[in-house]
Amino acid sequence: MVVGSGPNGLAAAITMAQEKRSVLLIEASDRVGGGARTKELTLPGFRHDVCAAIHPLALASPFFRSLGLEAYDLEWIHAPRPLAHPLHNDRAVLLERSIEKTSLGLEGDGYSYGRLMGPFVKNWEELVEDLLRPLSFPAHPWTSLPFSAKGILSARVVADQWFREKRARALFAGNACHSVLPLENISSGAFGLMLGMLGHAVGWPLVRGGSQALSDALASCLKSLGGEIVLDSPVSSMEDLPASRTVLFDLSPIQMERIAGERFPPEYRRRLIKHRHGPGVFKIDWALHGPIPWQDPECTKAGTVHLGGTFEEIADSEGRVWDGIVPKRPFVLLSQPSLFDTTRAPQGRHTAWAYCHVPNGCTVDMTDAIEDQVERFAPGFKDTIVARHVMTPALMEQYNPNYVGGDIVGGVQSFRRLFLRPLGRWEAYSTPASGIYLCSASMPPGGGVHGMCGHLAAKKALREMWPS
């Protein structure tokens, strides 16, 4: 049995079903998907991704790639380039699929960028296989150890070692911010390397029709294997669940404690309750009467746009968030899917999606700060807004209780908390109670739409509960 139908819950259920186990997936909402859902949030006909919108990790995921999800009507869409990063009074930095084209736009750092990223892009499949799993000796050490030696460093150290000019440093900072860590923290560099590598290797695609289509494809795959899905079924205690040999929870640790806490010893319960969550997000979806009028028109060819300026500006913004201070000029992550997917908005109209990091549980309205940051690089943007839908950290948690305080990645994504004895145990996924497993993004390899937390948790459950 699996509780929770986010990408990890769906992956866990599919993995169990592949081994001919009877699988029941229980979801509190009326749709599967968790962080990968799509709704008409603003106006009829405008389809918005509620949380995740761009999916490099999903396309690179070893487990998702093994499923052949295209057979379930999943269609990936690639913008002409994965990412644009505008700079004030300068042309935008562009992450192209080609390392060579990207390097040409990095001025004096182009050669260093190629030296840094080239070996990783060449061996990306081996790297992803080793990185998207709990800490262990890598299957491909000659590929993975050089990456780990750099990735364990902070983003600032990596940038200082490899880049001298603002363009490459800004590009790397924006990618590293997906760690939701200060850029001075160890292991934040790994996110900058990983996302840059995937941009070149597989792209940063969106899903035709919205992220819900990815979740629906996973659900169809599960049903084709004989799995059953029950919706609109909140779970508040183990008594709400039918008898099962194994239960995998695609939930935050605090949610699992509320449901199954009586099955655990007191010390483990305390660890679940005290699991540390990082910054939250403040998110806006817009219905627009036209494309965003970027100052640099090249930004209209990118599916994702990072808005924050230089490395120093971005590092200052993210550092303030971790100090509990609301930044006046936040780093903003923006997606503009309707430029490339005509199903997202009525003809001639557009949608856009953006969020910034804020202190966990923050109650400050960031609407003006986010829209000012967009306007900074796209003068006239505010005039294109027809309607907006705002999600504060509290509303994020209300939408999905896994997002404690607005934290969308399952907890602090530091190397120590995620990979070294997660929740105080030497082995990931298992709990002190036989047959109960945690398969959410609070387990390695952490946040992102890749399904590997669920897949690997289910593999462990199969080994332990049905030993050969």
Image (spheres, grey):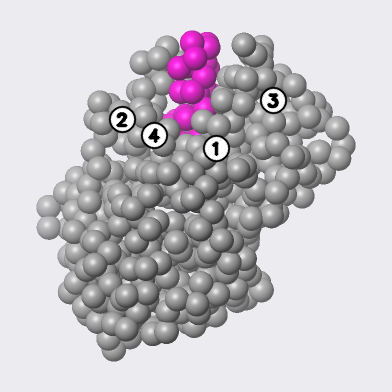
Q: Are marks 3 and 4 in contact (CB under 8 Å)?
A: no
Residue that numbered label 3 is attached to: 436
Residue 31 position in % (x across, y down): 42, 32
Which residue is at a point 58% across and 38% down the rendered structure image? 440
Compare residues 271 and 360 and report the one nearer the observer.
Answer: 271
Q: Residue at x 40, y 67 (%)?
A: 116
Residue 118 x %, y %: 34, 61
Of circles 3 and 4, the one toward us is 4
Disc 3 marks which amino acid? Ile
* Measured Cα–Cα span from mark 2 to mark 4: 7 Å
Q: Amino acid at mark 1?
A: Cys
In magenta segment, residue 30: yes
Segment colored magenta: 6-32
Marks 2 and 4 in Cβ contact (< 8 Å): yes
Residue ID for mark 4: 64
Residue that badge 1 annotates:
453
Confirm whether the magenta stretch covers residue 172.
Answer: no
Amino acid under disc 4: Phe
Circle 4 SS class: helix
Q: CA distance from mark 3 to mark 4?
A: 24 Å
In front of the other: label 3 or label 1? 1
Mark with earlier residue (2, 4): 4
The answer to whether 207 is drawn above or below residue 228 in the figure is: below
